[in-house]
Amino acid sequence: MTWLTSNSPGGAVPCTGALSTYADDLIALLDEQNIHDATVLGHSASGMISLLAAVVEPAFFRDLVLLNASPRYLDDIDYKGGMTAEELEANFAAIRQAYAEWVLAFAPAVTAASEGPGLSEFVKGLLGLRPDVAVTVLRSIYDADLRRLLPEISCPVEILQSRVDVAVPVEVGQYMAARIPSSRLVLLDAEGHLPHLTAPARLWPALDVALLGGA
């Protein structure tokens, strides 16, 4: 897959960054398994990887279900992504200086949870990363800008969005729903970026409808 990459304002040219590699992997997996009518559920950046793959090879996809996903995680002109470039650089500095302390502050904020097994699992996963790897992963996510691709999605898309999410504000879900042709925005009665970990009982009914039609 070949993409032009750019950090141009307003996403004039799609900037896929490292996400295009993961999209290639998803397409290769579907092709290897001879799956050509897939329903794909993707959370956060994984949702955007699925969306990118569906633009490149639409024949593999029947529909997409995106959970707290975002085509652009950084604020831009007339666009609220959830974080400014200055805030992102401050996060990188904190990661490099004291990674464990950053994790213990970041995890409760992004999950909107002060305790519980979901928070503990997320903290454990983050602490399992080296600080340099964490910076690389975050930068690949925040460098991406897929806003210009949204109108090119040809399959139906269900957008599941927490009512409160510091990483992906509700405005992002509304932005996508207004630009993806066959899309529906569902606001979840949940807070935090990872409701599948911290509030699964509030997520399952919406997933049941999105994946199985409520059957």
Image (spheres, rainbow, N blue to C red):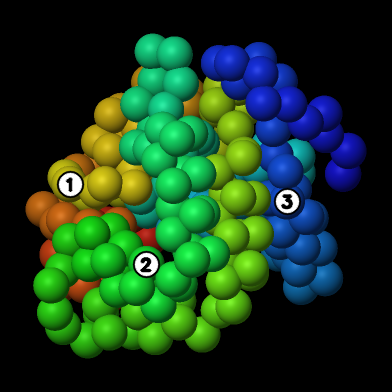
Q: What is the CA distance from the residue labelled 1 to the residue labelled 2?
A: 21 Å
Q: Residues within 10 Å of mark 2 (few under 14, many from 20)?
A: some
Q: Amino acid at mark 2?
A: Trp
Q: What is the CA distance from the residue labelled 1 to the residue labelled 3?
A: 28 Å
Q: Amino acid at mark 1?
A: Val
Residue 131: quarter of image: bottom right
Q: Is residue 27 or residue 13 the one in the foreground?
A: 13
| Residue position for label 1 | 164
Residue 189 coordinates in the image, percent (x, y) = 11, 53
Residue 11 coordinates in the image, percent (x, y) = 60, 20
- Residue at (77%, 63%) from the top-left corner? 25
Q: Which mark is residue 102?
A: 2
Q: Which mark is residue 18?
A: 3
**Taking 78 as reference, is 36 above or below it?**
below
> Extreme right residue here?
2
- Residue at (65%, 59%) from the top-left corner? 136
The C terminus - image quarter:
bottom left
Mark 1 vs mark 2, foreground winner is 2
Q: Are marks 2 and 3 in contact (CB under 8 Å)?
A: no
The N terminus - image quarter:
top right
Q: Is residue 46 or residue 99 the one in the foreground?
A: 99
